[in-house]
Structure formats: structure tokens, C-alpha cells
Image: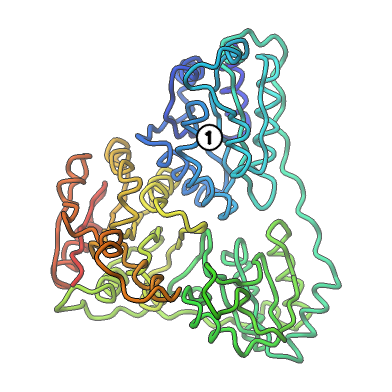
Amino acid sequence: MNGADALCATLLAGGVDVCFANPGTSEMHFVAALDRQPRMRCVLGLFEGVVTGAADGYARMADKPAATLLHCGPGLANGLANLHNARRARSPVVNIVGDHATWHRAYDAPLASDVEALARPMSNWVGSAETADAVSETACMAMAQAQAAPGHIATMILPADAAWGEARGPLARPRPAAFLPATRWEAVSAAAQAIRTTRATLLMSGGALRGRALEHAGRIAAAAGARLLAQQSNARMERGAGRVPIARVPYPVDQALASLASVETLILVGAKAPVAFFAYPGKPSALTPPQARIIELAAPGDDIEGALAWLADELGAGSDVEPRRAPRLVAEPPTGALTPDAIAVAIAAHMPEQAIVCDEAVTSGRDFFKHTAAAAPHDFLQLTGGAIGLGIPMATGAAVACPDRKVISLQADGSALYTVQALWTQARENLDVTTVIFANRAYAILYGEYAAVGAAEPGRNARRMFDLADPAPGWVKIAEGFGVPATRVATAESFSRVFADAMASRGPRLIEAAIA
């Protein structure tokens, strides 16, 4: 077999059976190898930011990596923004980046670049298979690095001659996942003492926001009075009726400071100490009170579930303690003007059980959380790294990972324009994604940020860099041009009706919500 066949076989042996791709000439032998392996699902993205964003969404829901296939350094560069988001989400991703044949590099061909230098800032590990014989072992290293807790970005460079050359040795064996680091007794003891004696908040992220870990945290809160809070941006949260409710640190600095003002002890559980998203004149970067004590119970790569279980036992919060759970409440369908609140209420009313909500609504989605706390149980995925353009690709990858679950994509119109090509992938793969475009015809968040940094009132030039109204994007035509059926609505009643219909049918849909 050649190196490309060895790579494909090694990926499949390691459980990597989806490849989000945008290939070029240097990757043709790997494409041919993929063609010989029907077990590998190949999903084309029309832009590399779609490819990497979809791999992020897939990993968050599948709890394993997909591969990406990117064309040389410029192709990788096109995907870096969403690799930044994936790295912040701690999503496992295996990037396969083609490169010129090793002997062709010396000729400085037009696509030549320093692929490793481009990969390094957004990767936790970078390796290059310089020969066909090295391909399988390098792929095993990449998969092991990607799947090491809590999840990493691994980038494997594949020169063209390593792909087409003969691989003579046996395939390398994928490595088993490493054991999670044991919880330290000192951390559990310190956290328990703080909860008993101070106003303590458990700041949670990662695995703490899911499954049994969240149940343990709920029992701790019920038995010992600790407050539960999620960090502002999280890769995945389990929410809704019957689950332990948990709020997030607000995005606006003043609101975040107020939310954390009473904290005497902050206990980190898979989270980092909260900081402002940006620097603002006269406002602190650290959001916790200066006198607050910070204790790390479990780092992101630790056994978070085990740490919370141990802490619950130490506090007498055993299985006989029932945590507080969100009730199931269905609000009356909204009427009148189409506002972000009306959209959130309608979504909460019609969302099916086990839906996956992918949120890049930005300004328009600020209050979505409070309106959906009592909705049907669902998973909530967020923009984690602040690089907009993740939402539609993330929803695409989540739908590939979970074809039996409805995916709801909450999408700001400005952010959507970065990677709108992902709609085509949703149509081609017939993915069950309903995209709600919050059409406020502006980068609305920038008006708030302009004021927050003290830049006074925006004038004509500033407004022209924030507004999308001249001309306004026509989302129905855009979506239909990519093969996705679409509807424009302008009232709360029409949105509720159209969204309910989308929830009752399968396949990709787009709703342009013309916000009042």
C-alpha cells in the first residue's frame, strides 16, 4: 500500500471515520485512498473555515475527533480562525494538511509556505510524515495527541511524495487513551472547607456541565448551599427540564462584576478564573473580587466527574440528596413585534427533546438562556474563542455527529456571512439543521463595544463599518442559492408558526427573522 492508504487505514483503526475536506492537488493520493475506503464518510466544505468549524461541532457531540483535509499552508490558514475556536473548546481534531513533495519544496512554487509555522499557534501538536513509512506512526501520534484529555488540535503535515510512496512496514497501532490524572485530596479538602465556611461558588466548564458530573454538582449545591455557575463560553452544556439549572457568567463586564461581587471563594471545576473578554478603560481584567480566594478542584484535563463525586461525598451530598431541577414550562406563543425575546420564547415552546442548539446569535442571543431554562432537555453549544463565523459550520458538524437529533442554529447575520458556504454542505448532506438568522442588519455588538471603550458616538464612517443595511443581505435568496429552503418572517406569530413547522419536518431549513 502507499502512504495515503496507510494513513486512511490507520485513521479508521483509531476510530476516526469522518473527514471534513477541501482538498487540492497535493492531496489527490489521499483522496484516492479515501475513495477506496467506504467506511470513511467524506464531507466537502466549500471553504476551509467550514471544514474546521464542522470538525469542531462534530467533536463536541461525538466525543471523538474527525479528520480535516486541508490544501497546503494557505488552505490551513483559511481554517485557522475556527481552529482557534476548537482549541478554546478543547475539541479533539486531527488536521491532515497536504504539502508539496519533499524534493519540490526547494523550488519555491507558488503555494509553498511554512506549514508548520502556520499550524503552530492553533495546534497543540504538529508533526510531519516526511516518508511513506512514517505516515502510519505519525497518524497514531496525531490521534493520541488529539484525544488526550481534555481534547487537543493535532496537525499532521503530509507531503505529496509521502502519500504516493510505498509504505513497506506494518501499520502502527493506535494508542489507547491515557488515564485521567487523579484528584488531589488537598484540593477536595480545601474546597469542602471553603463551602462549609464561606460564600463559595463552583465555576464550572467542560465535563462538569454534563451527565453525572452535573448531577454531583447539583447535589453539592442542594446539600451545602454552594452556588453553581458556568464560565461565560462553554463547548457544551446539558440544559432544560429535568436537569440541574446553571447560569453563566455574563458577557458585559459590569454585569459580570455584579454577578461575582459576593464571591468569597471561587472553586474552579474544569474552568479558568473569569476575565473580561476585552480590556476596557477604568475597568478590571480579572472579574473576581480582589479579596476572593481561588481554589482549583479540577483542571480541564483532570477527572472532573471523579473530583465532583469525591467533593459531594466529603460534604455528605450522597445519592439520597436530590438536586434542584429545572421544571418543564411551556410559555404561550409570542405575539406582536419580532424581537429576540419573542424568538427565544417560541424556540423554547417548540424545541423537541434532545435538540442541539448551536449559538452564535451574539447580541441578539444574550437573553436566550433565561427563556429556555425550562425548555425540553437539550445540548447547548457556544462560540468559545470569540472568532465569529463558527455557528453554521458548528451546526453542520453537530448534525453529522448526531443524525437522529434536531439541530437548531441561532445565527447573527453578520457572523453568518463569514462561513455561509456551510449551508451548501447542509443541503448536500441533507442535514437536519434549522438555521435562525437574527437579521438586525448590523454588527450590532460593535455599537455596544464602541461605547464601552469610550469612543463616543459613532459617526458616518464608523456606522458604515458596523451596518449591513445598504444593501441588506437577502437571506432567503442566499439560502435558496445554496439549496436550503428558506422563509422570511417579520412578526412573532409568523416566526412561531414557521419554526414549529421546521421542528416537525426533517432536512435543512433557514428562517430569516427580520428583527423589529
In the image, is residue 155 above or below residue 393? above
Q: Is residue 322 visible?
A: yes
In-image side of 80 versus 146 (left or right): left
User: Residue 118: image x %, image y %?
Assistant: 58, 36
Residue 1 appears in the rendering? no
Residue at label 1?
67
Image quarter of residue 185: bottom right
Locate the N terminus by quadrant. top right
Q: What's the residue at 14%, 63% (across, down)?
A: 489
Residue at 67%, 39% (x, y): give it: 125
Q: Is residue 158 left or right of residue 30?
A: right
- The amino acid type found where label 1 is placed reads Ala
Neighbour tally class for label 1: few under 14, some 14-19, many 20 plus, Cα within 10 Å: many
Residue at disc 1, secondary structure: strand
Image point 34% across, 55% down: which residue? 415
In the picture, measured across the screen, residue 51 lies left or right of residue 484, that is right
Left or right side of 248 for 449 = left
In the depicted structure, whether residue 507 falls above or below residue 23: below
Residue at 40%, 73% in the rendered image: 455
Residue 117 x, y percent position in the rendering: 62, 35
